[in-house]
Image: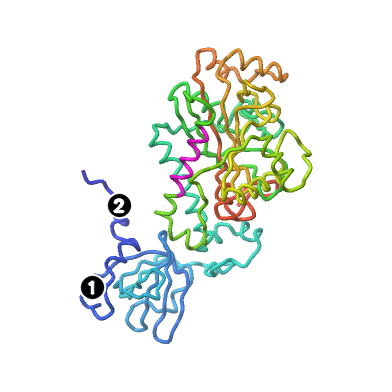
Amino acid sequence: MKYATGHLIQKSQTIAALATKACEPDSISSCEPCYIEGAIHTIRKMGNIAFILLRRYDGLLQTVYEEGKLSVSLSNLHDNTIVGMTGIPVLEPKAPQGFEVHLTNIQILATPSAPLPINISKWKLQTSLETKLNLRPITLRNIRERAKFKLQEGLVRGFREYLSSLDFTEIHTPKIGAKGAEGGANIFKLEYFHRPAILEQSPQFYKQMMVGVFDRVFEVGPVFRAEKHNTKRHLNEYTSLDFEYGYLTGFEDLMELETGFLQYSMELLRKDYARELELLNVELPNTEKIPTVSFAKAKEAVAEHFHRTIRNPYDLEPEEEFLIGKYYKEQYDADFVFVTHYPSKKRPFYAMDDPEDSTYTLSFDLLFRGLEVTTGGQRIHDYSMLLDKIQARGMSTEGMEHYLEIFRHGMPPHGGLGIGLERLTMMLLQEENVRETTLFPRDLSRLEP
């Protein structure tokens, strides 16, 4: 069966396809012409010849304009003019793609009515992060800024492909709810047709419900946290890569799954996103083996090795996370480290307590180059045990009736995790601020663009 691809997709050829058709300079007359589309990135005039760099979805393509040979005057072409071009692909080692297109015809499809407020053709934007974010729709046209989000696409693609290969079902859960899954005060409240509602902090309740349906589920979607943190690592809306896995034998299964996802995704980036990796000079992390250490031992190791005092026995401070990452890089050449058995006091009510010591949970965080990018663990699947823990914490079950109902009717042992996509991308690219790897950030001060 032949599937429709659309007239334009068939008509305009990819850079990769053109590279295979490029001819030697001395055999232009016998070469097959091609048709390409894109936006003019830059124009470099060299006497009667001009090099027009075309910005396309698949990269930059160099074209050659010869004065007097085309019906469109060079004076009518400007940066960001949208064009369709016909020409001959010719081998040229100095061109960005190893070939260039010698133009025979140009069609102007759209003309900008004003010049850009910032020069996006520079290799690296020489401006502040604030300016980059204020002009986000424009600055994302910079070839390196754009490459960040192609790599982010690769991470999401890897997540989907890897879990789908293991028979996980992709789900899509509501983002408006009656009660937050994580509790606490960091909830965005809103009015929903004269009823109180919230923006979901996590798909936690829903993905657990769906374990009772599909056994293995995953979701890629936004989550909302009303945290008043104005730091380089916090956002009030971010994209979470979530999965929930039924019939696990222990929370270690979840860490094994995440390791598999990371290995699959890094190989995918290496294979299909080599151009972006080179553009951004990205060194892919070591995922061959990810070490595991308990929360208590991690704190002790960092305190001893770096001569610091443990101030908070129930959580990891950002500096401690950084030092754990540094320690494991120095000792084991590890870019990732799983920190397990977090204190029950700092985990949600649905976290399974360690049967050997109920002050700790069968849970973990994944640190990537010293920053937490994942939180996960085994969940309580017994109805009575869940109610006991809710009562012990002095919590109300109001708004959780539908969630609790699934446990009354039998649930398998299960667990899951959530990965912060923007943080994962940030650490992959070794950026200093998570806003660099967020398309349109939402934080304490930013609600647009």
**Along the line of sight, which residue is nearer the eye, 206 or 296?**
296
Q: Is residue 363 above or below residue 424?
A: above
- Label the magenta part by its dominant secondary structure: helix
Residue located farthest toward the bottom when viewing the structure as drawn:
47
Q: Is residue 110 magenta?
A: no
| Residue 229 shows in the view | yes
**Horizontal and vertical percent position of residue 258:** 50, 38
Q: Secondary structure at mark 2?
A: loop
| Residue 439 shows in the view | no
**Horizontal and vertical percent position of residue 159:** 46, 41
Q: Which residue is mark 2?
A: 6
Specify the quadrant of the image occupied by residue 65.
bottom left
Q: Is residue 27 above or below residue 335?
A: below
First along the sequence among labels 1 and 2? 2
Question: Label 1 crowding class (10 Å Cα cut-off): few <14, some 14-19, many 20+?
Answer: some
Could you tell me how many numbered marks the image carries?
Answer: 2
**Horizontal and vertical percent position of residue 10:** 28, 57
Q: Secondary structure at mark 1?
A: loop
Q: Is residue 264 magenta?
A: yes
Q: Which residue is mark 1?
A: 31
Tell me the kind of residue under disc 1. Cys
In the image, taking residue 83 as reference, residue 33 lies left or right, namely left
In the image, taking residue 150 as reference, residue 336 lies left or right, namely right
Cα separation, mark 1 vs mark 2, equals 26 Å
- Check the picture and name the quadrant holding the N terminus: top left
Q: Is the residue under label 2 in contact with that under label 1 (CB below 8 Å)?
A: no
Q: Which residues are magenta?
A: 254-266
Tell me the kind of residue under disc 2. Gly
Q: Is residue 244 above or below residue 426?
A: above
